[in-house]
Image (spheres, rainbow, N blue to C red):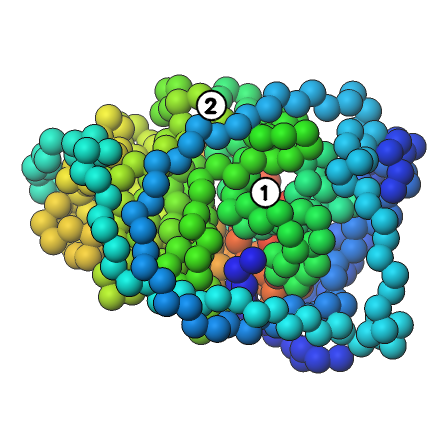
Amino acid sequence: MAMRLTIVLGVVGFGAAAMVCGARPAGATPETSGSGGVAVAPGAGPCVSDPPATHEPLVPKTMDVPIPYPVVTVLPPRPPEPAPTRTAMELPPNPCTNPCPDLTDGPVPPPSLASQLGIPEILLNPKPFYFGLPGPGPDPGQLAPPPEPVEPPTEVAAQSAARPAPQIGEVREVAKETGANSINRTDKRWQVDGTDLGIMWESAPGEIATVFGDTVGRGFHPPGGMGGDWRSNVLAFSTDRELSDGMTIDRMVTDDRCHAAELLSSRKLDNIEVTTIPTSGFAIGERQYLSYMAIRTWNSIPGTFYTNYGGIAYSDDHGQTWTKDPYARWDNIFGLANFQVAAMVPHGEYVYMFGTPNTRLGAVGLARVPKDQILNTTAYQYWREGNWTPVGGSSSATPIVDAPAGELSVRFDAARNVWQMSYLDTAKGAIVVRESDTPQGVWSESSSTVTVLDYPELYGGFIHPWSSGSDLYLNVSTWSDYNVYLTHVRLE
């Protein structure tokens, strides 16, 4: 499993098949947790027998220490992917019933000597670090021809006046969305024991799709996504409009009994292509789109990573299967290219693409493309010094938000007629929110929501599309828990 490091502030050193169902504590009086004062709703998942979903301490029970060793290999061309297996799965009406105890309820291992002594157990994990030699290229006959190139014009696009910084009121952790003792019991229902991100979009009227990043099942142990049954990404759907007590997942894309399927495959070869991570999603008509980044390696400066490229995939069967378009990609030349981590938002006649370089340390650039040309990179116009222009390409885009920005999430709030942006600001040590009247800005000053004083290893901060008015809902991840939490932010 790839190792992903995030912000760390502090000292790091020191079942049953059927359960009794009870009501979730919606409207419970919030408690206060963490020196930052984030209000946390007490309680557990949908079942009385579930223990409270507590956060893992910074000092972990288990420390998985990867030991890379070099491997030289001739890199073969990527073979055509076989048709994926998909299984229709009907869950029991009672959410407290474990549908697959034979798959998810193994024997509890005996306590290790380290746990008996109250110290972290150190696991040394040798992992290959590949050096790929060029092999034969792909058969050109396997690829469809690229889209016909177009020459979009240069058009004036002045910035709007800066809005005031959003005023942040109470910030409350609503519910643990994934993993053990979560409101969705994803470990029992889909073998999603550990996962992160939780990027959301409206996939159909009255439906929200949520895509998660690197996911592990049996043997999961934080910090990070350590364990077995590694999938680079998984996809869930929800019709839950009452977010004050969490977002209930209706179903996931599955490839077997109680098993969430991997959507976008990856080679899983560190330093060649270790994983494929979605960065945003949206729907145009019946087609679903995912922007994604092909990660070369996580093994770099803490909190950073290197990509091979940022790309776009699409699905014409409502997210069951996906195709990575071979031409809709932005290569990461010398590790400095922009639009490696993209947040794409349809609005009016265009899809707007907000992007940063790889790592969490770059500035935000902006592009737009007509809705009928999303997969044609020659049709993109980049915002540069007050104009939409194809001249200079993606490398010439003028920053609309200064560095550092990581894990962008952007939406247009139609009710307020304002653009909202959320991202991890590593300088502030917080997930921040900005607003603007136009996608190119001027964007407001940033306001902090969840900070490292609340969760020292936080990242993400993806906006729920059904946030409205003063109620802003974000999916937040933490490295120490390696799961996703729905958080409510009150905008004053």
For mark 2, give the secondary structure.
loop
Write down the residue under mark 2.
318
Residue 406: which quarter of the image?
bottom left
Q: Is residue 218 above or below residue 184?
A: below
Where in the figure is residue 113, as x and y percent of width and height? 85, 73
Where in the figure is residue 141, as x and y percent of width and height? 19, 33
Relative side of 343 to 223, left or right: left
What residue is shown at x 58% (from left), y 30% (from top)?
A: 255
What residue is shown at x 77% (from left), y 41% (from top)?
A: 104
Residue 45: which quarter of the image?
top right
Where in the figure is residue 387, as x and y percent of width and height? 15, 47
What residue is shown at x 47% (from left), y 23% (from top)?
A: 318
Where in the figure is residue 315, as x and y percent of width and height? 40, 27
Between 489 and 383, the one nearer to me in the picture: 383
Depth-wise, is mark 2 or mark 1 nearer the camera? 2
Q: Is residue 105 above or below residue 333?
A: above
Between 169 and 6, the one nearer to me in the picture: 6
Mark number for residue 307?
none
For mark 1, give the secondary structure.
strand
Q: For the residue carrying disc 1, how many other residues have a C-alpha within 10 Å: few (<14), some (14-19), or many (20+)?
A: many
Residue type beneath disc 2: His
Relative side of 96 to 380, left or right: right
What residue is shown at x 55% (from left), y 26% (from top)?
A: 86
Between 265 and 419, the one nearer to me in the picture: 265
Q: Is residue 389 above or below residue 4?
A: above
Write down the residue under mark 1.
473
Residue type beneath disc 1: Tyr
User: Where is the N terminus found, in terms of image quarters?
Assistant: bottom right
Q: CA distance from mark 2 to mark 1?
A: 24 Å
Residue 378: which quarter of the image?
top left
